Image (tube, helix red, strand yellow):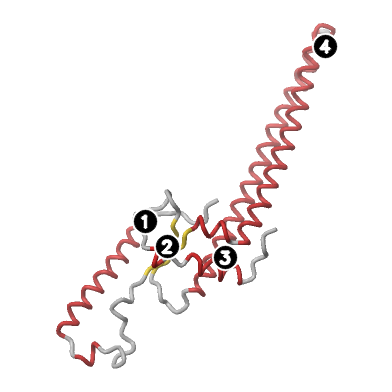
Amino acid sequence: MRTRKQFVTKGLLAALAAGLFMACQGNKSGNSATSANSDPAANPTAPAAAGFKIAYVDMDSLEAHFDYFKEKKSQLEQKQQQMENQLKGKANALRSEYEDLQRKASTLTQEQGETAQRSLMAKQQQLEQEAQNMRASYSEQEAKFTEELQKKLDDYLKGFNADKRYAFIFSYRAGQSNILYRDQAYDVTSEVIKGINEKGATPAK
């Protein structure tokens, strides 16, 4: 279950390029600026040279330790299993009815046989429609849960980064990310997991 699509947009690349450009410009201007301008205390509103900071959250680790996610995922898996068991039971019953009809075929008139076949076909179509409806309902519940999880994460990160210390916080997932290299010094996953669990999520059962 995924909470965020991994992609690199032109806007993101532009933002990163802008950050690098600002850092380079800061280095150039630092060579010619007066000592007063280069002193953060003298100009507290000026951004720090290393102010363009990024961080990332490992989504696999977050999902493994986020209590809310684990509980809701377990509930969805139980619903899916119940749905599959229900459909399997009805399919087995229909198969037994079909096999029973085959055994009785020689004792039925043509009209009785055709009526029984039409009944079986109608039941099969009904079962297929029921299966389609149940799976559509499950997909809707799964999508709703994903949206809720994403909102919880987004809302938490707004508070987590209220001091604007990070320009970007990326999501990372092994094998499914456009991030080719990550320095673990910028991994804030454990902080996010601890904080988002403490925020009031119901513990997993």
Residue furthest to the front in view is: 184
Please say if the residues under marks 3 and 2 sit with CB atoms less than 8 Å apart. no
Q: Label 2 vs label 1: CA separation?
A: 9 Å
Q: Amino acid at mark 1?
A: Ile
Please state which of the two labelled residues, at mark 1 or mark 3, is closer to the viewer: 1
Q: Dot 2, crowdedness within 10 Å: few (<14), some or many (≥20)?
A: some
Instruction: First in sequence, mark 1 or 4: give its number.
Output: 4
Q: Label 3 vs label 2: CA separation?
A: 16 Å
Give the labeled residue for mark 2. Answer: 170
78 above or below 22? above
Please say if the residues under marks 1 and 4 sit with CB atoms less than 8 Å apart. no
Q: Position of residue 78 (x, y in %)?
A: 70, 47
Q: Amino acid at mark 4?
A: Lys
> From the viewer's perspective, is 180 left or right of 70?
left
114 above or below 131? above
Give the labeled residue for mark 4. Answer: 104
Task: Kindly state the secondary structure of the residue where label 2 is placed.
Answer: strand
Q: What is the number of the mark on residue 179?
A: 1
Q: Label 1 vs label 3: CA separation?
A: 23 Å
Count of labels in the image: 4
The quadrant the C terminus occupies is bottom right
Q: Dot 4, crowdedness within 10 Å: few (<14), some or many (≥20)?
A: few
Residue furthest to the right in view is: 107
Please state which of the two labelled residues, at mark 2 or mark 4, is closer to the viewer: 2
Q: Position of residue 28 (x, y in %)?
A: 17, 78
Q: Label 4 vs label 3: CA separation?
A: 60 Å
Residue at screen point 25% across, 74% down: 23
14 above or below 83? below
Give the labeled residue for mark 3. Answer: 152
